[in-house]
């Protein structure tokens, strides 16, 4: 599955997509401006406290691990299962996304079948999906400010139909020896807005730079009716002086 779309806290002005308007400055000027107080998802109004993490500017990556039945090579024994073998796949945000070669090599070296089998020993009936961001030099503009080489930073895990709490995600990151998206803390909506407006520096960059923004979710985890986790985002560059 692809990672769920994360909505901004509020709706935005003017999303004109029809021909004749989508590239016309009279319609597109100001389209990024927030409509403050008009929530992008009505559920956001009910959340009083949010668990806030840094949003990393990179490329969305999925590490998919499962154990597939081992099948005999002999024709008369094709349907006989001989146990399970671990299988690891690497994908971008979509199944057709291109992935930089250096990043793919890093993922293969980091998430070996032996390591994944060690961390997730009981997953013969459920797939494990690690959601994270590929980041570093050449990944995005300014990616080299984060680190000197390409890497992967973990921010979510789904096992079967279950989204894990962030405390468990952090533990898995430690077991896999990969970075975990920096936690800023528990905040109210007003505190989040003030924090993002202050243009804080990234908590995981080796060279100081303003962080891209934040990702926030209720703590404990809350799901939408379709089973996807409730999350919202705010980017530092999206704020206007009048907000």
Image (spheres, grey):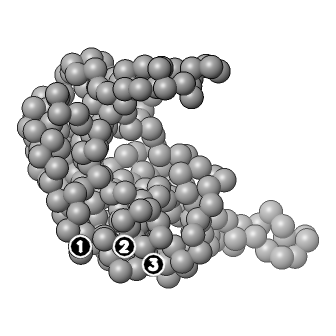
Asked if marks 1 and 2 touch (Cβ < 8 Å), the reply is yes
Within 10 Å of the Cα at label 1, are there few (<14), some (14-19), or many (20+) other Cα atoms? few
Quarter in which the C terminus is drawn: top left
Alpha carbons under labels 1 and 2: distance apart: 8 Å
Circle 3 sits on which residue?
110
Q: Camera-side residue: 209 or 147?
A: 209
Quadrant in the picture for residue 12: top left
Tell me if residue 104 comes above or below residue 63 in the rendering.
below
As helix, strand or loop, the secondary structure at mark 2 comes to helix
Circle 2 sits on which residue?
144
Alpha carbons under labels 3 and 2: distance apart: 20 Å
Quadrant in the picture for residue 155: bottom left
Picture residue at 29% right of the left edge, 26% below the top: 34
From the viewer's perspective, is 185 left or right of 224? left
| Image coordinates for residue 59, horizontal then vertical, percent | 47, 58
Earlier in the chain: of badge 3 and badge 2, it is 3
Q: Camera-side residue: 68 or 144?
A: 144
Picture residue at 90% right of the left edge, 70% below the top: 76
């Amino acid at each position: 599955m692809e990672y769920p779309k994360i909505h901004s806290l509020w709706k935005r002005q003017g999303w004109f997509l029809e021909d004749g308007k989508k590239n016309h400055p009279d319609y597109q000027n100001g389209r990024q401006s927030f409509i403050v107080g008009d929530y992008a998802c009505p559920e956001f109004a009910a959340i009083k406290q949010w668990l806030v993490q840094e949003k990393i500017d990179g490329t969305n990556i999925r590490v998919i691990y499962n154990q597939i039945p081992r099948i005999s090579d002999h024709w008369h024994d094709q349907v006989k299962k001989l146990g399970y073998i671990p299988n690891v796949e690497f994908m971008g945000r979509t199944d057709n996304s291109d992935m930089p070669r250096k990043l793919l090599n890093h993922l293969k070296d980091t998430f070996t079948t032996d390591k994944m089998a060690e961390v997730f020993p009981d997953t013969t009936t459920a797939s494990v999906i690690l959601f994270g961001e590929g980041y570093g030099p050449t990944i995005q503009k300014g990616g080299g400010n984060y680190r000197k080489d390409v890497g992967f930073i973990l921010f979510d895990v789904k096992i079967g139909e279950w989204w894990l709490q962030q405390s468990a995600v952090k533990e898995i990151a430690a077991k896999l020896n990969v970075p975990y998206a920096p936690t800023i803390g528990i905040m109210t909506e007003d505190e989040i807005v003030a924090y993002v407006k202050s243009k804080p520096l990234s908590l995981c960059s080796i060279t100081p730079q303003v962080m891209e923004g934040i990702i926030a979710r209720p703590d404990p985890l809350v799901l939408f009716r379709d089973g996807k986790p409730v999350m919202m985002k705010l980017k530092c560059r999206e704020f206007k002086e009048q907000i």
